[in-house]
């Protein structure tokens, strides 16, 4: 961690977001600023207003994440430019964020390893939840291309980053005793075809 000695809580943490293992809670964290009512004033129906608010929140969060990563590059030793940023630097950034995580990840020596609801506290480390990192990379990947980056050189879409996220997902699933597998949508039961009409009798 010596290479990160130049970073402080004041440098980055106010703009970082810790999301619970379910992404649905990410609008209640301190990094997300509520969208002002004026941004939705042009929408008359409640459903349209809700959609506009969600979109504004996502764009606001994406902008904050992008600014945070830019600040990380500037504070890096030696400083990095975006054009020289690679997948390896993105991995450094993700590992750096772990020190601010709030998700308990049990080690294999912990008696609560694989226990989804531990009955007591343990000294296992706190990490960024996989869902938080996965959503963060998705926003940064989009922001990179929106700011002029080419998809083929997008460091957030690098194979090493995808493999790292998969490793974090699998290891946290085992350590926490939960599953991140997407639930398959249940198809509605198919009704049997109607019986054919009775044959008409010939007179």
Image: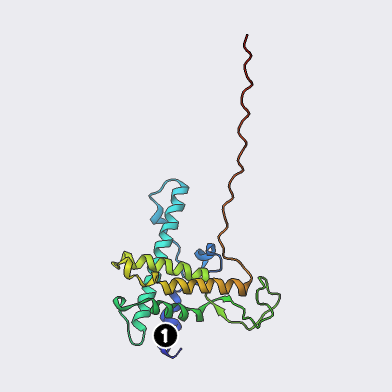
Q: Position of residue 89 (x, y in %)?
A: 38, 79
Which secondary structure lies at badge 1? loop
| Residue at (46, 81) in percent of width and height | 96
| Residue at (44, 53) in percent of width and height | 51
Q: Quadrant of residue 117?
A: bottom right
Q: Position of residue 48 (x, y in %)?
A: 44, 49
Q: Position of residue 86 (x, y in %)?
A: 35, 77
Q: Is residue 164 above or below residue 191?
A: below
| Residue at (58, 47) in percent of width and height | 187
Q: Is residue 123 above or below residue 60?
A: below
Q: Position of residue 189 (x, y in %)?
A: 62, 43
Judging depth in this view, the residue of 104 and 9 nearest the camera is 104
Point out the image quarter for the C terminus: top right
Q: Is residue 144 left or right of residue 34?
A: left
The answer, for residue 96, to whether it is visible in the render is yes
**Number of marks in picture:** 1
Residue bearing the label numbered 1: 7
The answer, for residue 30, to whether it is visible in the render is no
| Residue at (43, 73) in percent of width and height | 161
Judging depth in this view, the residue of 86 and 20 nearest the camera is 86
Q: Is residue 17 above or below residue 190?
A: below
Judging depth in this view, the residue of 183 and 78 nearest the camera is 183
The residue furthest top is: 203
Q: Residues within 10 Å of mark 1 (few under 14, many from 20)?
A: some
């Amino acid at each position: 961690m010596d290479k990160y000695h130049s970073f402080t809580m004041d440098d980055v943490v106010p703009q970082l977001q810790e999301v619970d293992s379910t992404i649905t809670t990410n609008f209640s964290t301190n990094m997300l600023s509520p969208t002002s009512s004026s941004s939705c004033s042009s929408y008359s129906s409640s459903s349209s207003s809700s959609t506009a608010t969600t979109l504004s929140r996502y764009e606001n969060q994406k902008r904050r994440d992008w600014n945070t990563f830019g600040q990380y590059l500037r504070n890096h030793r030696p400083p990095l430019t975006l054009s020289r940023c690679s997948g390896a630097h993105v991995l450094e950034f993700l590992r750096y964020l772990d020190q601010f995580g709030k998700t308990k990840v049990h080690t294999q020596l912990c008696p609560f390893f694989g226990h989804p609801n531990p009955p007591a506290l343990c000294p296992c480390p706190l990490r960024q939840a996989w869902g938080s990192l996965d959503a963060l990379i998705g926003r940064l990947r989009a922001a990179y291309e929106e700011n002029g980056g080419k998809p083929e050189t997008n460091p957030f879409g690098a194979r090493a980053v995808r493999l790292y996220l998969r490793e974090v997902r699998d290891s946290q699933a085992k350590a926490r005793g939960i599953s991140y597998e997407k639930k398959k949508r249940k198809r509605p039961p198919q009704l049997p075809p109607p019986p054919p009409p009775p044959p008409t009798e010939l007179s």
